[in-house]
Image (tube, rainbow, N blue to C red):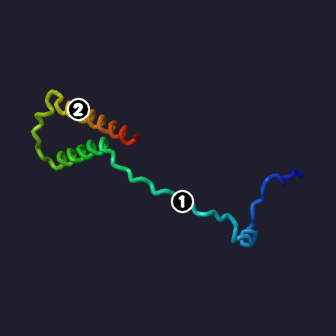
Amino acid sequence: MPDYSEFPTTPTAWQERALAEDWQHTPALAVPEPRRRRPDLVALVPGVAFVVLALVFIVGVTIPLGFLADGGLLWLLLIGAGVALLVSEVRKVRHRR
């Protein structure tokens, strides 16, 4: 017959009731309050712009789309994204200090 004495035994219900005062009671740990996270503006601004543009097109409002000619909107998006990324990196560096 194998010897299983090296393994701890699992307490039964009557043992748990008998040891109810000191059985598996751990003191509550002091957990610091988590910092409030700020929204990611680099993701939020294009998301809001997309939703607004989608709602405008669903409603059927006609918009003069001359700014889309020759990639004008693409240039605006690229410049805006670049500036937003630069600002976010500068903020991270200042926050680390």
Query: Which image quarter: residue 93?
Result: top left
Distance (Cα) linking label 1 and label 2: 46 Å
Residue placed most toward the observer, 33 or 24: 33
Residue at (14%, 30%) from the top-left corner?
Answer: 69
Residue furthest front as drawn: 97
* Residue 30 position in % (x across, y down): 54, 59
Q: Which mark is residue 30?
A: 1
Q: Which residue is drawn at the image coordinates 84% and 54% (left, top)?
A: 5
**Left/right of residue 70 with respect to residue 33 in the rendered view:** left
Q: Dot 1: what SS?
A: loop
Q: In the rendered view, tell whether residue 90 sits above or below residue 36.
A: above
Residue marked by disc 2: 79
Residue in front for this viewpoint, 4 or 61: 4
Quarter of the figure with residue 29: bottom right
Image quadrant in which the C terminus is located: top left
User: Mark 1, mark 2: which one is toward the viewer?
Assistant: 1
Q: What's the residue type where badge 2 is placed?
A: Ile
Q: Amino acid at mark 1?
A: Ala
User: Please, which residue is most extreme toward the top here?
Assistant: 70
Q: Quadrant of residue 80?
A: top left
Q: Residue at x 29, y 45 (%)?
A: 44
Direction from residue 73 to residue 8 in the image, left or right: right
